Image (cartoon, rainbow, N blue to C red):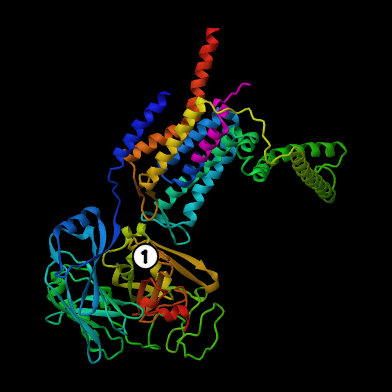
Amino acid sequence: MMYRDTFSSFHPTVNFLFFGLVFAFSMFIMHPVMLAISLTAALLYSVYLDGKGTLMFCLKFLLPMTLAAAIINPAFSHEGMTILRYLPSGNPLTLESVIYGISAAVMLGAVTLWFRCYTAVMTSDKFVYLFGKFIPSLSLILSMTLRFVPKFISQLEAVRDAQFCIGRDVSNGSIFRRIKNAVTIVSIMITWSLENAVETAESMKSRGYGLKGRTAFSIYRFDSRDKTALTWLIFCGVFLICGILAKGLKWRYFPSIKGTLTEPFTICFFIVYLFLCMTPIIIDRREDKIWRSLRSKI
Amino acid sequence: MKRIKIFPVFICIMFLLCGCDLKGGKNYQGTMEIPENGIVDVSIFKQIKDDSAVVTFKGNSNGCDYEWVIFGDDIPEPKTLNLAVEINEKQEERSSGLSFSSEDNFGFAPVLSVHLNSNWDCQNATVYDSSNKAVCGASVTGSENSIINFSVDNSVGEFIVRADNESENAPIIAETPTETKASPVSTETKNTKTDPYLTPVEPETPNAVSGGGNRVISDGSATEQDKYKTDPVPEGRPMPVEPEDTQIDSSKTYTCTFSIECSTILNNLADLNPEKIDVLPADGIILPACEVEFYEGESVYDVLQRICKENNIHMEASWTPIYNSAYVEGINNLYEFDCGSLSGWMYRVNGWYPNYGCSRYQLTDGETVEWRYTCDLGNDVGGGYAVSGT
């Protein structure tokens, strides 16, 4: 079995811990440098995993969304000491609310991109492998739900094509007729998804899923490479949590922008966070290099 | 395996760097007790100044608690000071008063808050020195027992604080403004701004005023709420004027007295959102009382908005259709709920807190508008009735 992305071939615990840490730090640390690091790493990894798809996603969806978030914030939040000008409503437009809007937008973008990477790396079998034993029904539901959307879309296309062949598509006939056809398609889809869910549940039950003493087949082995990676992730996590508790990453936006930036203490956290976020990319690049050098020797 | 060897090095670096001192801005560092003899050492003031700390020094004299609110940034030069103050509370014939005396000249003017054991039935007070000259104004807050806040530039000597009686026959008030202008005290203090608490309280002259385009004075006969949920307006007070019915006539200008203050926060520093201490003025005065011009038909909100723009004071308000008025959320970045869950901005015109929004109060010539921050739903600034409706 060959993986294009070496980080995906690591043990699911390592994958999950990495994403858990990255999500938590991206969502809870509003420090602009940390956000920038998170966004850059997420973008790089997403491009590595998905190539052009990510760039299209960024242009079509992420960029407009983040721009909207950055513009909407100062329209509703007027707190801040630096008044730039006055809005038509009579409330001030402040520098702080503009910068906060941009930071929130960056955070939104970074977390969305990380989730894109997450779905590519943490496949549902990995998730079920990790949590199937502790929380069997919840992990099954989660993996089914996560799988549902792409599955639903492909099934919808199939149903629509079939209906189109017999002339009952939404693009045909009067408005009344079209609505009727659309309702039929929706009804088919709902029936299908309910049936599908019940079938999956029954099938898992008949296999004895979640029963005591039942083992699961897994191809995952926790080797020394995973051990090193896990130690590294735990170290980064503990280090950064210490940093937050010691207020080394303190940053506030209101009423005036103030925070830690150039203290050696804080810079140390930036570096560790950068390496944490870049972990999969570093691993992948190194593995690619080894692979290329091995191939060139042949 | 190589990486594992790096971990101890990293951890060592971490512990080394944990000793780094992270510098913040101003921060409230709680209360310190003033020792028996009142002497607070220079090292403490130096520490406060270096940390830009805000510290409350608490003491007691003759049963009265008092507090000095000291902003480290205001200390020009740390030195050993005697913070002890001798306070005597007394009831005079018509007005309440207290006298206090301290020994050291601080070189700066921290706010002294005196927690009385009685309730002064007034909003403002005036501080007089031993030669009976008005030195500065004082704000009277507190719900049950009054708290008097004032800052005296040179606190050496004996001072008397007297309540400004708000009835028409209060003898002190009539003299105060003229006397302060002429007195050498005001030139000595180099304080060019007028004090908000020294504003003379205008006697009520309801119908003879000019400027209020179409406002009507309540006769107190209404018994039900109006369509914007306003309880009946007490007799002798102006009825609300809907902003949409008003024409602003910019050819006629009048003047009113305007001030914005938040001294109640100084008494509730522990509740204040710690991020907001940077925007808190050390004396609690955001805009000292000043004469401002307005056009006929303008409401308190219109004037507030313009004054804040002119003076570069931050102000945020939102229109509330249910009360047909703007609601002032924050002034000078001090917002509602920033100092406890019962805090926010209230306005007072001629000594009365209107029970309706500031867009519906149409100003007339010569009125006195005060914006005050409350930390207790209006009770501490003497305006609980405007909120509770009783």
Number of marks present in the image shown: 1
Q: Is residue A214 above or below residue B376?
A: above
Circle 1 sits in a helix, a strand or a loop, which is it?
helix
Q: Is residue A79 above or below residue A188?
A: below
Answer left or right for A41 relative to B20: right
Classified by dominant secondary structure, the portion drawn in magenta counts as: helix
Label 1 neighbourhood size at 10 Å, few (<14), some (14-19), many (20+)? some
In the rendered image, the residue lying farthest to the front is: A213
Give the quadrant of the N terminus of chain B.
Answer: top left
- Is residue B194 among the parts visible in the rendering? no
Q: Position of residue B168 (x, y in %)?
A: 30, 90
Give me the chain letter of mark 1.
B
Q: Position of residue B352 (x, y in %)?
A: 38, 82
Residue sitting nearer the eye, B149 or A66: B149
Q: Position of residue B292 (x, y in %)?
A: 32, 72
Residue at 68%, 39% in the rendered image? A147
Residue at 20%, 84% in the rendered image? B175
Residue at 41%, 26% in the rendered image? B3
Q: Position of residue A79 (x, y in %)?
A: 41, 57
- Is residue B168 among the parts visible in the rendering? yes
Q: Is residue A288 above or below residue A94?
A: above
- Where is mark 1, residue-wise? B271
Answer left or right for A180 relative to B276: right
Q: Which residues are magenta?
A: A1-21
Residue A67, magenta (yes or no) = no
Answer left or right for A283 relative to B280: right
Quadrant hosting residue B169? bottom left
Residue at 43%, 46% in the rendered image? A30
Quadrant hosting residue A57? top right
Residue type of the residue flagged with mark 1: Asp
